[in-house]
Amino acid sequence: MSVILDAIETKKLGGTLSEETIREFVEGYTAGSTPDYQMSALLMAIFIQGMDYGETLALTRAMAESGERHSFPDCVDKHSTGGVGDKVSLTSLPIVAACGAPVAKLSGRGLGATGGTIDKLEAIPGFSATLSRERFERQVEEIGLAIVEAGELAPADKAIYALRDATGTVDSLPLIGSSIVSKKAATGAGRLLYDVKRGSGAFMKTTEEARDLADLLVRLSENLGIRSSALISEMDNPLGSAIGNALEIRESVRLLKGEEVPADLAEMVRRVAVRLLELAGVEGPETAVEKAIRSGAAFEKLGDFVWAQGGDPNALENLPVSDPAREVLATRGGYIAIVHATGIGRAALALGAGRVKKSDRIDHGAGVEILAKTGDRVEEGDPIARLHGERAAERAAKLVMDAFELSGEPVEPPPAILDSL
Ligand code: URA
């Protein structure tokens, strides 16, 4: 029997796949010699029967080794499982780089209601997310911060993920864990922080599920020689007030310049930066983070990095946002009980800030500004959100209106970070 048929039979009956079998079917599928229908059957058997830890580690390793690999043992990196208004990479990474911890990051684009760091950076005129391997390595050396688009890393994961997406086999813990960690292992940073989002706007809906994924990500990474830890953060509400590419860069700039930003964003970014510095072994990380922001060093680092990648640092403080801007008003008074992240994410998408299909063209200036956060008191007629962008503005306004839930009683805003390991 062929390796793939053998693997399907074993998994179908609840057996355990050997490391060699896993490596062979990963290689066979990546090389195009295993047809989609056989790989789909195996993925469904894995989805139903699960995989033990040994199998999951073998799958992670085989996918990590399926293509090009980098090696940055002294660098830090972070990975977010994706959220609405998540500009933590744009802010925490210049801070840690300014504190002396070098960052080599490969990032993705947004799809659906969650944004991607590369799309956000491309809102800066001239910014390029494509660097040769040599230039990427030189920039990490000279500036201490480089962020490029993940290219041909872990091609096995790319192929398998596309098939999972089309066969209802995405939401399987071993498949998600191995997919994420294979790309991180191929990226090669020696220290890694996972930000696992939990909530209605995230992949993991409960804290329990998020903790299970965080445990798996850390364990797999450590077994592959990456020093790692994880935070579990809130994603029922969008993070900060800006959702959309240029809007999020503007909010990031405000934070890096020490100006006022919403408390959830300020707390989240500081906690992530401190954790990254701890992983890098930097002494007194809390003080270092505050100093990097207050002295202007973190903002300067952002400018140096943008300039090195062809962007205009002078444009950072006033990136254009799309007209027409229209405000959404509260229809009654009360306390904001929740701003549903999914609704806001869908509104930003409708306005043109994201893409439904990979080929869609995005409007970098489009998006939503949240003017009243969870816990705030509003009166009837107060502006609660501002929309930017021309596409589907009516639908976006309705989505935003529906995303705001009001309460007659005072509401305590949720903590930005729910757990850590
Ligand atoms: N993100 C990934 O990279 N892979 C998954 O399987 C799910 C989310």
Image (cartoon, rainbow, N blue to C red):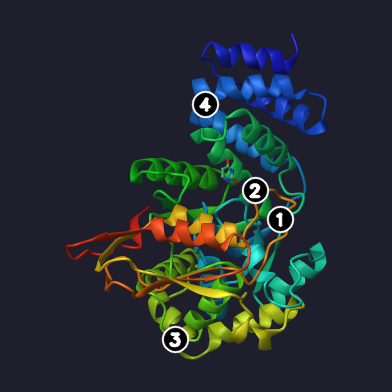
Residue shown at the point (56%, 28%) measured from the top left: 55
Residue shown at the point (46%, 58%) measured from the top left: 398
Please count the marks in the image: 4
Q: Which residue is mark 3?
A: 259
Q: Is residue 134 visible?
A: yes
Label 2, label 3: how far apart the Cα atoms are: 35 Å
Residue 24, quarter of the rendered image? top right
Q: Which residue is mark 2?
A: 183
Q: Which residue is mark 1?
A: 150
Identified by mark 2, the residue type is: Lys
Tag 2 and tag 1, C-beta contact below 8 Å: yes
Query: Label 1 neighbourhood size at 10 Å, few (<14), some (14-19), many (20+)?
Result: some
Residue shown at the point (71%, 30%) measured from the top left: 26
Label 2, label 1: how far apart the Cα atoms are: 9 Å
Label 4, label 2: how far apart the Cα atoms are: 19 Å
Q: Is mark 2 within 8 Å of ligand 1?
A: yes
Q: Which residue is mark 4?
A: 51
- Residue closer to the observer: 40 or 157: 40
